[in-house]
Image (spheres, grey):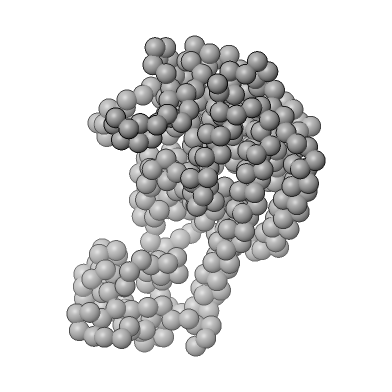
Amino acid sequence: MYIYEKKDWPDFHWDENEINSLLISVRHHQGRFLGKMENLGFTIRKEAILESVAAELINTNAIEDEKLDADQVRSSLARQLGLDKAGLVPSSRNVDALVEVMIDAAHNCMEKLTEDRLFKWHKLLFLPKGKKFLRIKPGAWRTKINQPMQVISGSIGKEKIHFVAPGSAKVPKEMKAFLNWFNSNADLDPLLKASIAHLWFVTIHPFEDGNGRIARAIADLQLARADGITQRFYSMSAQIMITRKSYYDILEQTQKGSLDITNWIRWFLNCFDESLLLSDRILAKVIAKSDYWQMLNDTAINQRQKLMINKLLDGFVGKLSSSKWASICKCSQDTALRDIQGLLDIGVLEKEPGGGRSTSYYLKDLAKA
């Protein structure tokens, strides 16, 4: 028996003493983190928002084994946030649509959550890619009456059923109850409400696909309300991705358990707390990047060089060679070598040990120079 089959569904309850104690601790950490963000300069704040929202979008899709191009995500966000960044790559219509969902959830967090809004998000998640046929109908509740909506893992013949959602005929009524609750209950602690909303929505599983991503977007909307600001400085999905197995485990245990959801709320709040610590590391990286560019403030650097310095500051994978430079910047090998030599001359790049065709370069720590 699943929780939605219980007689008192959806009358959730929890250990108030335990949860209230945890809420006080998490709220304290949240306040300190947001206070730190308020003291940052405008540009650094925007860079922190970009990195946090990019992490949220990339990871909420990665949780569902959907890989996004990180450069496209950052480019799309930079354009929407009005950030002047060198070397922006073109972003696809699909990436722009996914960014639109995240921006809407945060920036318009105080607006009502409605069927039409959820349908719009769902359509944006599932824009057709070229001539590829969509196996689902975007922007509508699931309707396959005789086919149960199941969450399954394992290979064919060895499937394991983790969850069976309510029948599609029940979805409109279930969603009406959910939305009525979500748009009211102002007295409930916003963090607590975010955790319940995530669980409740993903248990109804109203769409044919994309339920997890939309559940996390709903939680993100509610977390924006909890912060009291529309700017996102942390990513729950980045932390969920780190502990993805425990995320699915606690969902399954809760959906097969009782309406006492203390364990789920505890897990959610601890995950939120860890996401704040993760964002501290993201913020430190953003500040270090800003400081690096401040040291290069009066240095003549072209757009290709700016692009590659940013990539190195973001954590370039592998070794940087002139051929990689030429490929990324879409320039000739001779131009790449001139760009590299220019940065060697001013002490921004240094050669790795070795030479000849194996010559590679790394970014010098200017603070220690």
* Residue 231 against residue 348 in the figure, above or below: above
Residue 295 visible in rendering: yes
Does 307 sit left or right of 164 as displayed? left
* Residue 10 against residue 196 in the figure, above or below: above
Towards the viewer: 355 or 143:
143
- Residue at screen point 27% across, 74% down: 321
- Residue at screen point 38% across, 39% down: 94
Towards the viewer: 331 or 66:
66
Task: Where is residue 67? Give x, y as percent.
Answer: 37, 46
- Residue at screen point 40% across, 53% down: 70
- The quarter of the picture where the N terminus appears is top right
* Residue 172 against residue 277 in the figure, above or below: above
Where is residue 47, by image quadrant?
Answer: bottom right
Does 228 sit left or right of 234 as displayed? right
Task: Where is residue 89? Give x, y as percent.
Answer: 36, 55
Task: Where is residue 362? Give x, y as percent.
Answer: 37, 78
